């Protein structure tokens, strides 16, 4: 017993089973450890155990001490009595049998391990499944086989492949694309220009090329895009529109006037880029394509026989209005208009100051190569901005015009600069002028900007009355119409809330232009009687 007490420095402190006390701390203070050991020896169970061990040692029997036995069953033997009363000890932290130093520690001889760290089992490597595929996610095997069977049905009786005019049904039924994409898809697969697409070539492109698992926007983007570019150009849409013009029943009447077919296609493309290419650089990205509504409009155009019901981008009546408005201003018909031409727009509705800003090319650089002249594409952007002011592209267009110093905010002085001409025009027309101070209060109430000392583009986009603010500053006719609150226009808006300001404007102008043409035809003796029942129910 005295030998055991004297050898306390060699005693394994872990045997005390003190969950709060670190074994290292016990060995650091041997006096404290000795007192604990003596207290432990005073326990009846401990005294009996030590006596039994001493007797076994004298008799030469193996010592049956938990943690010292090499027997696998020794770990399940009863533990030494604890200093804490039953149920009062805090729980021990959980230990795994594979990595516990208490289980793996060898006390009877020198360790065969070079480092105690080696006993810790290696962490299991978790295999992360591939989530990025450069050429698209491969289709599952079952889906792939299913589509190959369906594809094979379309090539029955065509061992040499399908010709271009036979390809439209495959485009719609298998690819689920608008029918007027068949020519573009056909040429994308028939890279050698053989005039035939075989079953194998189609399977390689659509199934093995992982087009099958792409969303429709990515499919259209991949079909139209040039291989060496990462965006769509305006020219990429021309083959699609040529096929639309050649096959759509609502555009069949244009086949005798190819020059207007070309103008229609150009106008559709300009409208697409105005609303969707928000960066304004002429490079339509996949992200912009997905965020826009072009795909829905294309599918609508493919399903709807009356092209004028496809109000987004493809309506022929909308094209007719844009083209005729441009032709009215282009007095010398050189397909260019200058400041004096544009000032006549809308019965001289715009101020000279805003027209100057437009021709300074602040809101948008002209594509026209003639200095001081606006081309047809530039006019399309202008008329969409002017007649669809609540739309985000229009707000950005006019914000750049009013922001004279280009610092990203519209100040009181900048608004006053443009309103001064409006005020002068009201005085010339013998109308009661509205002072700028009153107008400024009205604008602040309409926009509710975060900071009342200036207006940001974010403020404008957050208000439904932003378009009217610009009308107040530089369009006198629309300003007066806003002040009078025409009940007829208000009723129209409530009856057709899905229609945009552009939709309503284009409808009114098309009726006006049609009636003027009928009157002109009547003067030439070739008019048909105007039938109000033919008017669309707007």
Image: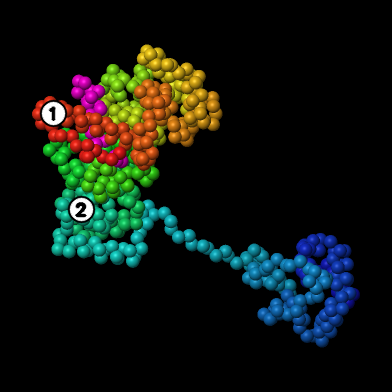
Answer left or right for 230 relative to 441.
Answer: left
Regarding residue 360, the answer to whether it shows in the image is no
Q: Could you tell me which secondary element the residue under label 1 belongs to?
A: helix
Vertical placement of residue 69 versus 482, above or below: below
Regarding residue 73, the answer to whether it shows in the image is yes
Q: Position of residue 255 (x, y in %)?
A: 14, 40
Q: Quadrant of residue 30?
A: bottom right
Q: Is residue 327 magenta?
A: yes
Q: How far apart are the two marked residues, 1 and 2, measured between alpha carbons?
A: 43 Å
Dot 1 or dot 2, earlier in sequence: 2
Q: Could you tell me which secondary element the residue under label 2 belongs to?
A: helix
Answer left or right for 478 relative to 110.
Answer: left
- 1 vs 2, front mark: 1
Please name the residue that numbered disc 2 is placed on.
168
**Quarter the N terminus occupies:** bottom right
Colour convention of the picture: rainbow
**10 Å neighbourhood of mark 2: few (<14), some, or many (≥20)?**
many
Q: Quadrant of residue 530?
A: top left
Vertical placement of residue 322 versus 148, above or below: above
Which residue, as the protein is rendered here, is positioned at the far bottom? 59
Q: Quadrant of residue 111?
A: bottom right
Q: Which residues are magenta?
A: 311-335
In percent of the image, x 36 and y 63: which residue is there? 140
Please name the residue that numbered disc 1 is placed on.
522
Vertical placement of residue 379 versus 167, above or below: above
**Quarter the C terminus occupies:** top left
Vertical placement of residue 179 versus 519, above or below: below
In percent of the image, x 26 and y 40: which residue is there? 536
Q: Position of residue 193 (x, y in %)?
A: 17, 49
**10 Å neighbourhood of mark 1: few (<14), some, or many (≥20)?**
few
Which residue, as the protein is rendered here, is positioned at the far left? 525
In percent of the image, x 27 and y 55: which residue is there? 175
């Amino acid at each position: 017993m005295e030998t055991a007490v004297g050898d306390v420095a060699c005693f394994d402190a872990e045997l005390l089973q003190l969950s709060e006390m670190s074994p290292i701390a016990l060995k650091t203070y041997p006096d404290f450890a000795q007192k604990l050991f003596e207290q432990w020896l005073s326990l009846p169970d401990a005294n009996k155990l030590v006596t039994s061990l001493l007797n076994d040692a004298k008799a030469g029997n193996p010592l049956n001490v938990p943690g010292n036995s090499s027997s696998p069953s020794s770990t399940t033997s009863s533990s030494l009595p604890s200093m804490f009363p039953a149920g009062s000890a805090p729980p021990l932290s959980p230990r795994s049998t594979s990595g516990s130093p208490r289980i793996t520690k060898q006390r009877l001889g020198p360790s065969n391990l070079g480092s105690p760290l080696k006993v810790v089992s290696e962490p299991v490597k978790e295999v992360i499944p591939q989530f990025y595929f450069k050429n698209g996610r491969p289709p599952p095997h079952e889906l792939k086989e299913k589509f190959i069977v369906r594809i094979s049905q379309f090539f029955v009786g065509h061992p040499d492949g399908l010709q271009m005019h036979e390809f439209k049904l495959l485009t719609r039924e298998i690819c689920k694309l608008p029918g007027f994409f068949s020519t573009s898809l056909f040429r994308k697969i028939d890279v050698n220009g053989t005039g035939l697409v075989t079953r194998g070539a189609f399977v390689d492109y659509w199934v093995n090329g992982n087009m099958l698992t792409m969303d429709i926007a990515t499919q259209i983007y991949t079909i139209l895009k040039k291989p060496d570019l990462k965006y769509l150009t305006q020219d990429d849409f021309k083959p699609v529109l040529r096929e639309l013009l050649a096959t759509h029943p609502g555009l069949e009447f244009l086949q005798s006037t190819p020059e207007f077919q070309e103008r229609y296609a150009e106008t559709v493309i300009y409208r697409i880029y105005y609303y969707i290419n928000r960066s304004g650089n002429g490079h339509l990205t996949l992200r912009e394509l997905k965020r826009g509504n072009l795909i829905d409009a294309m599918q609508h155009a493919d399903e709807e026989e009356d092209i004028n019901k496809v109000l987004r981008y493809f309506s022929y009546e909308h094209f007719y209005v844009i083209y005729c408005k441009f032709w009215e201003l282009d007095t010398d018909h050189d397909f260019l208009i200058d400041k004096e031409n544009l000032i006549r727009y809308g019965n001289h509705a715009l101020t000279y100051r805003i027209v100057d800003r437009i021709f300074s090319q602040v809101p948008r650089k002209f594509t026209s190569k003639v200095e001081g002249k606006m081309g047809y594409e530039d006019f399309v952007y202008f008329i969409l901005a002017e007649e669809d002011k609540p739309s985000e592209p229009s707000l950005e267009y006019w914000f750049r015009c009013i922001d004279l110093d280009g610092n990203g905010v519209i100040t009181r002085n900048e608004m006053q600069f443009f309103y001064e001409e409006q005020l002068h025009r009201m005085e010339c027309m013998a109308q009661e002028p509205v002072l700028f101070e009153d107008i400024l209060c009205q604008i602040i109430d309409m926009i509710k900007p975060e900071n009342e000392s200036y207006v940001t583009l974010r403020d404008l986009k957050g208000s439904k009355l932003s378009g009217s603010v610009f009308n107040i500053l530089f369009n006198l006719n629309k300003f007066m119409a806003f002040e009078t609150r025409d009940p007829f226009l208000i009723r129209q808006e409530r009856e057709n809330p899905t229609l945009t300001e552009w939709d309503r404007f284009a409808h009114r102008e098309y009726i006006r232009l049609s009636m003027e043409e009928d009157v002109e035809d009547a003067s030439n003796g070739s008019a048909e009687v105007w039938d109000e029942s033919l008017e669309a129910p707007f």
